[in-house]
Each structure stands twice: as C-alpha cells, then as structure tokens.
Amino acid sequence: MSILISSARALAAAFIPVVLFAQGDPPRQQAAAPSPPPGPAIRKISTASALSTVNLGAVTSVRELSGGRVLVNDGTRRRLLLMDSSLKVLSVVLDSLSESANFYGTRPGALIAYRGDSSLFIDPASYALLVLDGNGNIARVRSVPRVEDVFYLSAPSPVYGLPGVDAKGRLVYRIQARPAPPKVAPPAGVPYFPPEPDSAFIVGIDLETRKLDTLGVIKIPKQEYVLRMMEGGGISFTQMVNPLPLTDDWAVLSDGSLAFVRGRDYRVEFLRPDGAKPSGPKLPFEWQRMLDEDKQKLVDSVKNLNRRQQTTSYVAQMIRWVNMYNRDYPKGFSVPEGFALQPGLQKDWKLPPGVSFPANYIYACAPGVEPTITAALPGAAPVAGMPMMGPPGTPAGTPSCIPAPIMITGGQTPPPPTMRDVGVLPAADMPDYRPPFPAGSTRADADGNLWIRTLPPKPMPGGLVYDVVNKDGEMVDRLQTPPGYTLVGFGPNKVVYLQMRDASGIHLARVRLR
C-alpha cells in the first residue's frame, strides 16, 4: 500500500522512499474491463522524500541547484527562498520588505534557469533583470531586454508558456502576433477593432546585443468578439467563449533545444541547437470524436452555465446599487430560483421581493465593530481577546461579521447594472475531436523530457495526468499527481517538485521517481 503525502510534520521526521503504482486495481467482478487507453500505463506519484515545513503562499516555480539546493519562488508572498536538499530554508534571497537590501518587488516575479547554477529573476514592476549566482547572491542587475515584452516574461499564468534559455544563451519566450491593418478603412467616426490573430511567435533575444530572432510559430485559439453600438453611443464588447480551444504549446528543453507540441495531431517538433528540425511520431491518445449533436450539447451547456453565472452576478450588483445609492428595484425585477445572498451585506438593506436573510447569515460589521469568531479552529488554541459570538449554527472559525467595504457617497449616481450578453462560439467552429491538452500545459524537466498535461476524454479519479515524452518525441511514461497537488519544477535524475496543501498551509514536496 502506498503512503500518501498527508502532512508536513509526518514527512519531515523520516525519509520515505517513492513508490509508484499503475492506475487501477483488478476488477472484483467477472465483467469485462474496459480497454486501457493507448500508450504506457498511468503511474501514480504517491509518496515524497522531503517536505518543507515553512508555510508558503504559492510556489510559482522551482530551480534546483547543485547539491540538491533549491531556489523557490513564492510569488504570493513575494519571496525568493534558498532551501537545502531536505527543503529546509537556508536563506531569504529576495524579500518583500521594501527596506530589505534585496527587495523582491511589488509584483510576483519570474525565476528562469540560466547557465550552470546561475539564474535570472525578472521584476515586472521595475523592469529589472537580476542575475543570481549559484548561492543566490545578486551578481548583476540590468534592465529587461524589451520593456513591451515584460508581461510575457513574467506572466503569473502559465498559459503563455515558461520562458527559458536556449543553447545560444538567448532568452526564449512567447509574444503575440500583431493583427494586420484593415484592407478598407472604416467610415469616419466608427472605431476599428482588429481581429485577434490565431497564432503566436516563439522568439529568442540576445541579452547583450538585444537582437530578437523568431524561432517558431504556434497556433493558439482564436479569440472571437461581438461588437454592438448602444443607443447612448457606447459600444458593447462581448467575448465569445470557446468550450474546446485547440492549441499548440512549447517549451525549452534542458539541452537548449526547443520543442513545439502540435495539438491537431499531437506530436512534437524540435529545433535543435545545430538548426535541425526533426519531428517525432504521433503520440498515443484516446481521441474522442465530436459529432454535430455533441458540439451543440456542449454549446448549450456552456451557455446555460454562463447565463446562470451572469444572472447571479447581475442580481448581486443590483442589490448593492439599490442600497448604496438609495434607489428602487426596476419594475418586474426578480431573482432566479436558488439564488443565495453573498455574505457581508448590511442588516438594514432592502432586498428584492421574495428574498430574505437566512437565520445564520453573516452580516456586514456595524461601524466600529470588529469581527469575532464562533470558536477556535479544531486543534488550535483560542484567540486571545476574541469572544466566541458568531452567528448560531455556524461551523467553528466562522466570523461574526464581515468588515463593510468603504462606501463613497456624493457625486453622480452611476447607471444601474445591466445583464451582460453570453457569447459562445458556434458549434460549426469547433474541432471535430476533443483537444489533447490545454494551453500552458507543457513543461521541460531536467533530464531532457517533456511533461505534457493532457485532457482525459473521460472523468478520471485522482490528480492531473502528464504524458512524459523523450528528446526523440516518443512517449516513455504517464504519471498522475495526487489530488490537489501542482507540478512546480524539476531536478536532475528524475526529481519532481510538487506544491501541496494540508491543514497547516502550503508546502513544497520533493519526489524522486523510479
């Protein structure tokens, strides 16, 4: 039986070897088991060799150095930590405190592996690029190579891919393609919104000469918009939701090669340091065909879900608008069935017809009143000076009230909220097969492999599933993370770093695969 990662306290005390098991147990009944998906059997990552004890905000990336030391980019708390091989903090390399000599910055930065044990850190707020040596010391400070590209170098979401350094020392990242000007100029007074391109460029820039080279092109989901002129002269701008976005992805391998993962036929194309461009075979995947009726059902389902979300948001905004500006509800205004009031409204606010505050509702705090808690959290000591006076029937740890937001009075009353249009891409514009992976799903490990997070065609218990592809574009393994774990980095010799959460907070786990 595998030992699951459960708490920082249990794993910090002893070394537990990694055990990987194939997914699924033998069926208990004699019924024929469904045929397994193509490719290698899925193995589960179930134990770890080390777990950090320090609480983290959110690990955006990890960089392993020689001797098993680790640079950990805690973007939420704006800290760059240096840990040893047991994930114990050795030092704070960059701190969020502005009086610190090594100031992290005011926004989450990006940590990028550079030559040897050196690393690059990009501060998007100051446009600074720090060069860190193997001990985490700042060896050099320079400006980012292109200010207009700093967002793509430090985007908090991995949807744009993770920047890296190729074999020539160029900083590699993704930029958007620019739309072409209109072939025919619009009439005078009519604004022009160019259509979004359906492709993006992977570029490399020399840090010394600032020369920018285009290294490859990838397909991205095209963003469709609907523009409408309103009666008052304004413009209604609606983005069309794409339920099945088909995309390519990319990554920089540990040897400096570039990998382009094609979504249409699920294969990997390479750009080698010597300029060669080999292509790997089509990767095994359980393709699921989407018939016209399947596409339409998906469109209708997404429309209904978005409409419910928009309606709920509209009603909540209307309640606030009516009470903050002393207005009346529109004639015939009603709330959808099952609508629940968001916590933190004033006790004396007037609600729409048919809506009332529940018995255990958590109101906004009255002026000068601080929130209290119903009881201490399980296993925690009571908070000194905080009486247990929460609403009756609420679970432990529930606040008695929620601090009221600052209300600005006076001036001109804004117009009432309006229902936003729900736009979904037509079924005819969707692909005929479910995409194999989403945007930003590809990562390169320290052993020359690609890890591609796939989209299973059927619901699958457990965490995310990754296809592991070697330097020749062949699938060699399939691994599944535990539920609630996030892949954040790699080390050489099959070392994987995962972010996990337990009752005491967020921690970093170090796993050595077999």
Image (cartoon, rainbow, N blue to C red):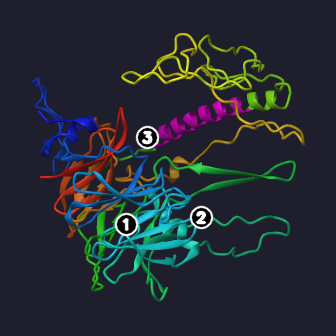
Q: Position of residue 119 (x, y in %)?
A: 36, 71
N-terminal of the pair, mark 1 or mark 3, is 1
Q: In the rendered structure, which amino acid carries the disc numbered 1? A: Trp
- The residue indicated by pointer 1 is 250
- The amino acid sitting under disc 3 is Asp
Magenta-colored span: 295-317
Q: Residue at x 82, y 25 (%)?
A: 329
Whole-number angstrom distance, CA of label 2 to CA of label 3: 27 Å
Q: Position of residue 126 (x, y in %)?
A: 57, 68
**Residue pictured at 56% horizontal, 23% vertical:** 399
Judge whether residue 184 can be spotted in this image. yes
* Residue denoted by label 2: 196
Residue 266 shows up from this direction: no
Q: Earlier in the sequence, mark 2 or mark 3?
A: 2
Residue 354: image x %, image y %? Answer: 71, 13
Q: Quadrant of residue 93?
A: bottom left
Q: Toward which corner of the image does residue 319 lie, by quadrant?
A: top right
Q: Residue furthest right?
A: 411
Task: Please tell me which residue lies in front, 173 or 51.
Answer: 51
Q: Residue at x 39, y 21 (%)?
A: 378
Question: Which amino acid does the dot numbered 2 rest on?
Answer: Glu
Residue under label 3: 294
Looking at the image, residue 306 lies above or below residue 190: above
Image check: 198 left or right of 363? left
